Image (cartoon, rainbow, N blue to C red):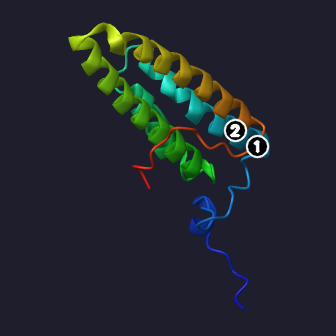
Amino acid sequence: MNNETNADDLALPQKPSQGEPAPEMPLAQRRQWAMFVHLAAFSAYAGVPVGNVLGPIILWQIQKDKVPGLEAHAKDAANFHLAMTIYMLVCFGFSMFCFVGVLPLMGLGLYSTVISVLAAIAANDGKPYRYPGAIELIK
């Protein structure tokens, strides 16, 4: 074995191998990032078009090399909010022709908010959360 180290090797940070957690990222911080992914869906309420779907995906893409396990949270959140967007578009279509779609539309908005908060709390506690009503479109 060669015990010599090159000065260039020490200058470059070593990336963890695929599937191995980053050593500098504590568990509490990984849980916080998982929580942030679920809460990123609220960017739609701030006026970001389709932010409820893109928010979790963007956070995942930014942190995917640093936070192991974030992919599952991001995909679950994005799938749920994509399904909610589809359901809301259908309700909106019905409300264009009759008043019947307005109440389900408001109900879906409230449901989406509550379920997102519950998912964020579960992620911060380190528990997996399966969104009810989600359609697995992003695999």
Mark 2 → mark 1, Cα distance in angstroms:
5 Å
Whether residue 137 sits left or right of residue 74 in the image: it is left
Q: Nearer the viewer, residue 64 or 16?
A: 64
How packed mark 2 is, by other alpha carbons closer than 10 Å (few <14, some 14-19, many 20 or more), is many
Q: Which image quarter holds the N terminus?
A: bottom right
Q: Amino acid at mark 1?
A: Gly
Q: Which mark is residue 26?
A: none
Q: Position of residue 122 (x, y in %)?
A: 72, 36
Q: Residue visible at 35% across and 27% down? A: 50
Q: Is residue 100 above or below residue 1?
A: above
Whether residue 118 sits left or right of residue 139 in the image: it is right
Whether residue 41 sits left or right of residue 121 in the image: it is left
Q: Secondary structure at mark 2?
A: helix
Q: Nearer the viewer, residue 28 or 71?
A: 71
Q: Are marks 2 and 1 in contact (CB under 8 Å)?
A: yes
Q: Position of residue 128 (x, y in %)?
A: 69, 46
Q: Is residue 16 above or below residue 4?
A: above
Quickly name the residue at label 1: 126
Q: Position of residue 69 (x, y in %)?
A: 63, 53
Q: Secondary structure at mark 1?
A: loop
Q: Residue furthest top?
A: 99
Quickly name the residue at label 2: 123
**In which quadrant of the rendered view does residue 58 lie?**
top left
Q: Residue visible at 56% across and 35% down? A: 37
Q: Residue visible at 55% across and 22% down? A: 111
